[in-house]
Image (cartoon, coloured by chain):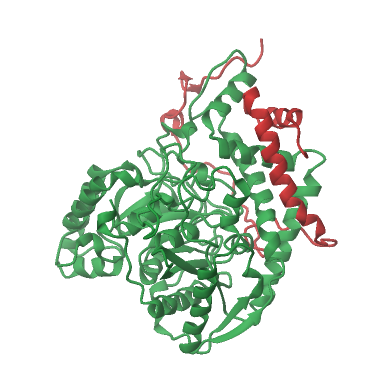
Chain colours: A green, B red
Amino acid sequence: MVLLTDLTIAEARDGLARKDFSSKELTEAHIRAIESARAFNAYVLETPDRAIEDAVASDKRRAKGEIGALDGIPIAVKDIFCTKGIRTTACSKILAEFVPPYESFVTQKLRQSGTVLLGKTNLDEFAMGSSNETSAFGPVLNPWKSSIDTAKLVPGGSSGGSACAVAAGLCLGATGTDTGGSIRQPAAFCGIVGMKPTYGRCSRWGIVAFASSLDQAGPMTRTVQDSAIMLSAMAGFDHNDSTSSRQIVPNFESSFEKSIKGVRIGIPDEYRVEGIDPEINELWETGIQWLKQQGAEICSISLSQTQNALPAYYIIAPAEASSNLSRYDGMRYGSRVSDVSLTKTYSKTRGGGFGPEVVRRILVGTYVLSAGYYDAYYLKAQKIRRLISEEFNNAFSDVDAILVPTSPTPAFAKGEKENDLIAMYLNDVLTVPASLAGLPAISVPAGLSKSGLPLGLQLITRSFDEETLFRVAQSIENSAGWHHRPSKFMF
Amino acid sequence: MLVDKSTVLHIANLAKIEVPDGDLENLASELSHILGWVEQLNEVNTDDVIPMCSGVASMQLRLRQDKISEENQQSDVLSNAPDSRDGFFAVPKVLE
């Protein structure tokens, strides 16, 4: 018998429909799995009572025949989505005790579709990081281990807790947020599917803000089909988010009905960046061959601004962060460290509440926005952003999707890049360009390295063409025959 | 170095973040490193390029009517306040 925690969302949905098991049984299996895997530190808050309550309510709805698209499915939520009455910290000390009096739009939609909330997952503080090592709750462990090295590996970041939970069978799916790669890179590191929708597809209402012109919520799942199912439940117009899109949300699960025959796939040479692992380049070649065999047309394209995306991102994102995080002043919510004057209270509160990476990014952002530097840094970066976006648009007049790797390396060891900022930032080099252009992108697990670690391939499509994205992604998934899971004996 | 200790102190003051004296040197070096790295952008010609400041290039922001959508939320609004009195946020004295 298959373990309930090994099911995909689609399988669990069918099993629930057939009454093979109840949502309560499915949920209890996950609660037990979470309890036995606390060493990963994937969850910063477990909500077993709420989960059982949700599951029982779902089973009741099912008995009455009134079910939603994800009814009874146990999921995890990144601890950056506000959940009403449930502590939400963004894994920062400054929000350590914050209990939102309201629910984020995306988690509200997931609740309405019938999901069961298992708990809140770990992340880099305010989603600033690529290894989940900047969390105030401590790092998350990758459930995968190298076959040639005993070092403990990072799960990637910032959605490291969600990626770990999905990979280790501690939920059937999880929400993530992606600003420069925070869904896709941890998905690649943990051997799961991570999807960043078009900017505006999912409402940002109730998501703790990092860089508002880049932040986007998306699903993290074990299969491409599950990703499509979950996005259908998360996306939609919200009048509370001024950048929310009114585009109609299709049933993304129907994306798979057509084949990829005749789909034009662009391969940009500029993504062969320095420092990329040769095994990842090989896998990229293999991916090209897979798509060709399935009838896609492969076209060489040029994206000459690729190398400028990362430095532009590390101006724009900190600039927006410095502005967004000015709200943490210890007056209306969050912790306060009192001192002799208001100004001193502000600086003590913020100095004590933010971790080192967050302070660094706020300072960089404040610097590039300050008088005399604004034009040279911030405005310059925004102009580069326009060039990057236009170059993608040009490419998409010729091709339907772009295939590139997700990250330059597989998961690295804990502590390995802590003292080398730029090396840490380089993790995002292949994910940031699509972020700056606001395009949908997905990471699909496509192979294992020689040391037995998962490697991901990334697809990018036109804005609001998630259907092509899912269709080509599933084709990669089928060709790869991905069935690998981290060994149960690893924890 | 692009950024020295006094500049870090100045920015930290603008950002209202207390930075211990012992961290200034390290931060100056890290910030210089980051800002030096992004200088490669100066080599790109961006004359006549319009800056892009929205999530997708074609995006236009909507306007909505400025009206109250939810009333009587005082206890919710104050529920996370570090200090509140008589239905108000209580803050340190601003004027002596």
Identify the residue at image location x=45%, y=62%: A188
State left or right for residue A418 relative to residue A19. right
Q: Is residue B6 left or right of residue A160?
A: right
- Compared to residue A255, the image places residue B35 above or below, namely above
> A268 above or below A240?
below
State the quadrant of the N terminus of chain A.
bottom left
Residue A7 at x, y percent in the picture: 25, 65
Tell me if A217 is positioned left or right of A272 in this view. Answer: left
Left or right, residue A463 beside residue A75 = right
Residue sitting at x 68%, y 42%: A365
Depth check, front residue: A244 or A488: A488
Q: Taking A279 as reference, is A159 above or below it? A: above
Relative to A141, is A185 above or below? below
- Give percent across and percent down for residue A430: 59, 63
The residue at the far top in this view is B96
Q: In this rendering, does residue A237 appear at all?
A: no
Q: Position of residue A115 (x, y in %)?
A: 30, 56
Nearest the camera: A123 or A288? A288
What residue occupies the far front of the structure in this picture?
A148
- The x and y percentages for residue A166 are 34, 57
